[in-house]
Amino acid sequence: MEQSEQRNWKGQALKYAGQLMQLIFVQLPKVPLMDVKDMSLLEKWSFFLKYFEDEGKQSIIKEVIKQEEEIAMADKIIKYMSQEWINQLNEEFEQLSINDNIRMENARIKWAREEALQKGRELGRLEEQRNMIETLSQTMSVGQIAKALEKSTEEIHHILKDCQ
């Protein structure tokens, strides 16, 4: 005997607290297209179960529902279950969308923080460089400063100009 695990539509294992469950599989026969009044109850159920979503067979399904109260109840249950399932999916997709937006916003914030830190470090280095060049300019020529810092004289002039 083969054992299997029942799962819900989310893939989560169903728990039955050790209860035994009997499953009966019915293969739907090929129901011939006939007048509903000529169908047996089994043929009506088979036709309903096989074609309840088939747009082309809805007029026959409606006739079957009119004739059989139990099938009408099954139709209501299936429609309710389908709508409940759709609502649940919509809620989950909405939550996924919200979570994606939060992750994207957090990534933007992290990027902006890292950019700000990098700019701060660069500004700090520029400020240090300006202070050092300004100090050196009191005792050295621009050419000597450029040679010592391995920069062009234009860069040194530009830095000194920004300091003033």
Image (spheres, helix red, strand yellow):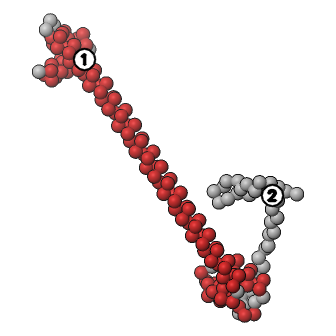
Image quadrant containing the C terminus: top left
The residue carrying mark 2 is 19
Name the residue at 15% across, 21% down: 163
Q: In the image, residue 111 lies at what x, y percent?
A: 38, 37
> Where residue 4 is drawn, which disc sits there?
none
**Who is closer to the viewer here, 47 or 135?**
47
Label count reads: 2
Q: Amino acid at mark 2?
A: Gln
Q: Secondary structure at mark 1?
A: helix
Vertical position of residue 34 compared to residue 164: above or below: below
Q: Residues within 10 Å of mark 1 (few under 14, many from 20)?
A: few
Q: Position of residue 67 (x, y in %)?
A: 69, 89
Identified by mark 1, the residue type is Glu
Residue 108 left/right relative to 55: left
Q: Residue at x 43, y 49 (%)?
A: 101
> Between residues 19 and 114, which one lies in front from this camera angle?
19
Give the Cα distance between marks 1 and 2: 76 Å
In this rendering, the answer to whether 16 lies above or below 117 is: below
Above or below residue 39? Residue 149 is: above
Using the image, tell me which numbered label, if any, was put on residue 128.
Answer: 1
